[in-house]
Image (cartoon, rainbow, N blue to C red):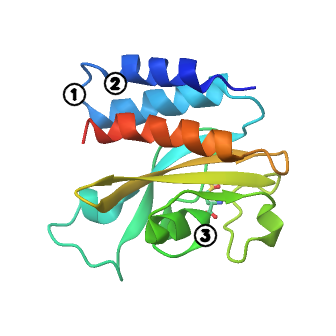
């Protein structure tokens, strides 16, 4: 079972004193990918408006592939599309027990069976999402939601 207490302490240590947000995303992807059980992909999608735009229009905003560990993945996900875009629009964590039953799921990896997506925010607006996939059905539950949301709060402190 994943030790979220340990993972949170390590996420805090990796982000403390780090002034490069891309490095924080990269190190947290690596931390989770290498220390969580049965995960096949861990990474971040970041809102385009937070990187490239001076204004924000949710109807055209997109999530762009950021730092990750795992196989190459889709690079652009519109808000409202897939599990990632759904979590970004709902502004809440989405847990998918069986990706085959989630309408609109974007299959980057044909072997992925379950997924959790946790959004993170600045000033009430979504900055990006943490996306984790597993080849095991029903891999993610409430414990993961709680643990990963706490890790996203660590990222928010750097934004
Ligand atoms: N399955 C995601 C797409 C990203 S990959 O899992 C890395 C989705 O439906 O949004």
Q: Nearer the viewer, mark 2 or mark 1?
A: 2
SS state under label 1: loop
**Residue where numbered disc 3 is placed:** 82
**Residue where numbered disc 1 is placed:** 19
Percent of width and height locating residue 26: 44, 32
Q: Evaluate whether residue 99 shows in this view.
A: yes
Identify the residue at horizontal 28%, vertical 61% (top origin): 124
Q: Earlier in the sequence, mark 3 or mark 2?
A: 2
Q: Earlier in the sequence, mark 3 or mark 1?
A: 1
Left or right: 59 in relation to 67 = left
State whether label 3 is within 8 Å of ligand 1.
Answer: yes
State whether label 2 is within 8 Å of ligand 1.
Answer: no
Percent of width and height locating residue 10: 47, 18
- Callouts 2 and 1 close, C-beta under 8 Å: no
Q: Report, in whole angstroms, how far the alpha carbon at label 3 lies from the one at label 1.
A: 31 Å
Crowding near pointer 3: few (<14 within 10 Å), some, many (20+)?
Answer: some
Tell me the number on the disc at residue 145. Answer: none
**Residue 128 higher or lower than 146, as above or below:** below
The answer to which quarter of the image holds residue 54 is bottom left
SS state under label 2: helix
Crowding near pointer 1: few (<14 within 10 Å), some, many (20+)?
Answer: few
Report the label total.
3
The answer to which quarter of the image holds residue 156 is top left
The N terminus appears in which quarter of the rendering? top right
Seen from the viewer's position, the closer of residues 54 and 10 is 10
């Amino acid at each position: 079972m994943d030790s979220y207490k340990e993972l949170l302490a390590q996420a805090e240590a990796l982000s403390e004193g780090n002034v490069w947000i891309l490095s924080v995303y990269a190190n947290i992807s690596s931390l989770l990918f290498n220390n969580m059980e049965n995960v096949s992909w861990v990474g971040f999608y970041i809102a385009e408006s937070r990187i490239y735009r001076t204004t924000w229009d949710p109807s055209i905003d997109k999530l762009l592939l950021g730092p990750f560990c795992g196989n190459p993945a889709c690079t652009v996900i519109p808000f409202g599309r897939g599990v990632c875009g759904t979590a970004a629009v709902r502004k809440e964590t989405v847990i998918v027990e069986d990706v085959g039953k989630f309408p609109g799921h974007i299959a980057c990896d044909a072997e992925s069976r379950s997924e959790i997506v946790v959004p993170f925010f600045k000033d009430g607006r979504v900055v990006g999402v943490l996306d984790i996939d597993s080849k095991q059905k029903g891999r993610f539950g409430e414990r993961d939601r709680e643990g990963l949301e706490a890790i996203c709060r660590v990222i928010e402190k750097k934004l």
